[in-house]
Structures are given as C-alpha cells and as structure tokens.
Amino acid sequence: MSRLRRWAILLLVLTSGIPASSDSLHAILRHHFEWGEYDSIVRKFPRVGDTGAADTTLSLSDKLLVGVACFETEKSEEARLWFTGVLRRDISIELDKEYVSAGALEFFSSVKQAALRDAHEQQLRMSQQVPSFSEIILKKRLSSKTKHRYALFLFGSAAAFGAAAGLSQVWYNSADREYQRPNLSQGEYDKLATSRNASRAIRNSTLAVSLVLASTSLYVSF
C-alpha cells in the first residue's frame, strides 16, 4: 500500500462522522506513536474517564502508549492517570524498553511502585478487618467456655437455693408437728404459728428461685 493511500485512509477515518472501530483506533495510535507524533496522540485520545469511548475501546497496551505520549508532551498527571488505570487492570504489565525513552520507563516504574504499595495496603486493611478462620474458632471456643461457666454458676446457685428450700421444709415440718400438739398455751401457739408461717414462706421463695436458676442454666447451656 502506498504512503499516499495510507494517509488517505487515516484522513477518512479521522474526518468521518462515524465512530472509529477499535481496530481503526489502534492503527491510528500505532501510526502516530511510530512516527513520534505524541502531540497528535494527546489531541486525538483525551482521557475521558473509565466510561469514555477512548478509554474503553483501546487495549491495555494502547493505553500505555497514550500514557507515554502524555509523558513525552510534559503532561505528567495525565500520564499518571493512564498508567494507573492500566495497572488497576493488570499490575504485571510492562512497557517495551525498545520503544520508549528511559524517562518514560522510570516514570512508569514509579507509578507502578505506588500502585503496588496501594494494593498491598488495601490487602492489609482487608486482612485486618476480616478475622481469620482460627480467630473465629478461638472466639467460638471462648464463647462456649464462658457460657459453660455461667451455666455452672447458675446451676450451683440453683442447687444452693434448692438446699435452702429443703432445710426450710424440714423446719416447717418440725414447726407444724409442734403446732398440732394439743393443750398449747396461747403464747406457745402464737410462737409456733409464726415459726410455721416463716418456714413456709422461706421454703416457697427459695424453691421458686431454685427453679428459675435451674431453668436459666439449662437455657444458657444450649
């Protein structure tokens, strides 16, 4: 293909109202890059964001070339944006040392190192926020031990109140037998009646507390 025909095709693509295909954009970009026409690349491939046409139709390698063109035209921040966008997609990508300047290589390397640090810091933050499997198991074990201790404490308390209820019942039985004796004086009758009522009240209250504690210990255990 003659040079004149080649230029005619490129001119037709650039001036037509129909959007160029990705192959056409690739060809235009490569042509300008091979001839060192970095200003033309910066004008024809402006960065319009991740959802822009030029940003989505180009391959990652082509985007690197646009970044190099921005760097060579002293648009370092624009170059950084292009390089960073590519590295977010593929952190292992590299520039071809045979086709770019040493300055562009050094600048790209600094951007890549910053991207690697950001990725490492993000991974570290995520690992700190999400507990490991061993930490989850340890927390569950500690929680189980705590529940077991509470259950034992409640069960022991229930047993203690149960024993108090049993002693109160013995006291009540003794007071009731004395209360049933005939020929009691009024003073003896009143004293035994008070003892009988007190022992019954203590028995009922301690028995109720014992039942509540026993039920709670079973609930905590399961």
Image (tube, grey):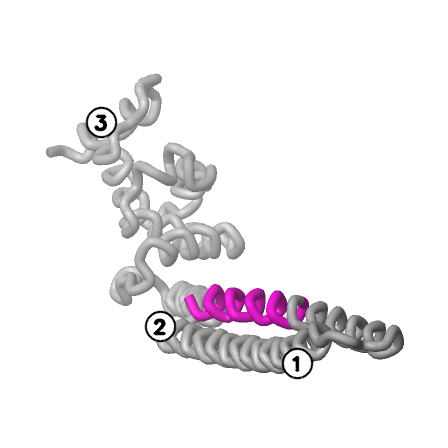
Quick check: can you spot residue 118?
A: no
Quadrant hosting residue 144: bottom left
The segment highlighted magenta reads 205-222
Identify residue for label 2. Answer: 133
- Residue sitting nearer the eye, 32 or 52: 52
Residue 188, given in percent of the width and then of the height, sits at: 83, 78
Q: Residue at x 42, y 41 (%)?
A: 50
The single residue placed furthest to the left in the displayed view is 1
Please state which amino acid type lies under the numbered disc 3. Ile
Identify residue for label 1. Answer: 174
The image shows residue 200, relative to residue 89, as above or below, that is below
Magenta stretch: includes residue 12: no
The secondary structure type at the circle numbered 2 is helix
Q: Main secondary structure of the magenta part?
A: helix
The secondary structure type at the circle numbered 3 is helix
The secondary structure type at the circle numbered 1 is helix
Residue 66, given in percent of the width and then of the height, sits at: 38, 48
Q: Earlier in the sequence, mark 1 or mark 3?
A: 3
Identify residue for label 3. Answer: 9
Which tag is nearer the camera, tag 1 or tag 3? 1
Callout 2: few (<14), some (14-19), or many (20+) C-alpha neighbours within 10 Å? few
Instruction: Point out the image quarter for the C terminus.
Output: bottom left
Quadrant hosting residue 4: top left
Magenta stretch: includes residue 217: yes
The single residue placed furthest to the top in the displayed view is 17
